[in-house]
Amino acid sequence: MQKLDTAHDLQTRLSAVLETVKMEFATLTDAQLRWKPAPERWSIIECLQHLNLAERFYIRNIQHKVDKLGLIQMSPTDQVLESDWVGKAIRYAVDPQVKIKLPAPGMIRPRPAAELVPADVMGQFLELQTLLHSLLDKAVYLDWNQEKVMTLFGNWLKIRLGDAFLMLVAHTERHMKQAMRVKAEMATFAITTNNL
């Protein structure tokens, strides 16, 4: 994978995420956003809040790297992206295609849907995803193989910047699919309930 092509691909995928939120979730009521298919499963708003909690941490760390750039160069240098075992493992754990379900660590587990303000959660989500999209424009001036960011597991476990970007977008896509499944189940539940 080449850095510049990957950055462009990630921006395209983030644009699709933003469009999905605006088209699929923005018109839902607070009750619909809080609806859960089962007590142990997350609602749409809980999925989005989980992403806010997890991604704010990484985006803040990436923002620090970008802020240190200072003057913007005229053209970014391309590079072949490399992954180490840490990056590969974390990316695998959040890949939308992988069916393994891992429990979210406590610090990024959302509060119950009833305690969340959907408009605030949605606003934060859109703001963070837009910021990540714009950070990709500036981050292409960094070395994605050499620069590392801290993980949620602590400063002792870091991942390469390229892996961090790939992980963030894959993690977002994973939970967007989850939120879309909740929306589909909600529609089925409403039809079934109305037919009783």
Image: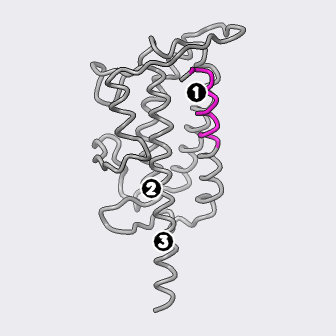
Q: Please give left or right for residue 140 compared with residue 121 in the image.
A: right
Q: Which quadrant: the C terminus?
A: bottom left
Q: Is residue 180 left or right of residue 137?
A: left
Q: Which residues are magenta?
A: 2-15
Q: Tell us which disc is closer to us: 2 or 1.
A: 1
In the image, what residue occupies the spot 42% across and 19% down?
A: 160
12 magenta-colored = yes
Q: With respect to residue 195, does 11 lie above or below?
A: above
- Specify the label residue 76 is tagged with: none
Give the mark count.
Answer: 3
Judging by the rendered image, the residue that carries numbered circle 2 is: 178
Q: Residue 95, percent across and down?
A: 42, 41
115 vs 149, nearest the viewer: 149
User: In the rendered image, which quarter is residue 116 located in?
Assistant: bottom left
Mark 3 and mark 2 in contact? Answer it, CB < 8 Å.
no
Element at label 1: helix
Amino acid tagged 3: Met
> Pointer 1: what residue?
6
Crowd tier of the residue under label 2, counting other residues whose Cα lies within 10 Å: few below 14, some 14–19, many 20 or above:
some
**In this view, 65 is above or below 17:** above
SS under mark 3: helix
**Quick one: 129 or 79, which is closer to the camera?**
79
User: Where does residue 1 sit, x and y in percent of width and height?
Assistant: 53, 23
Question: Dot 3 corresponds to which residue?
Answer: 186
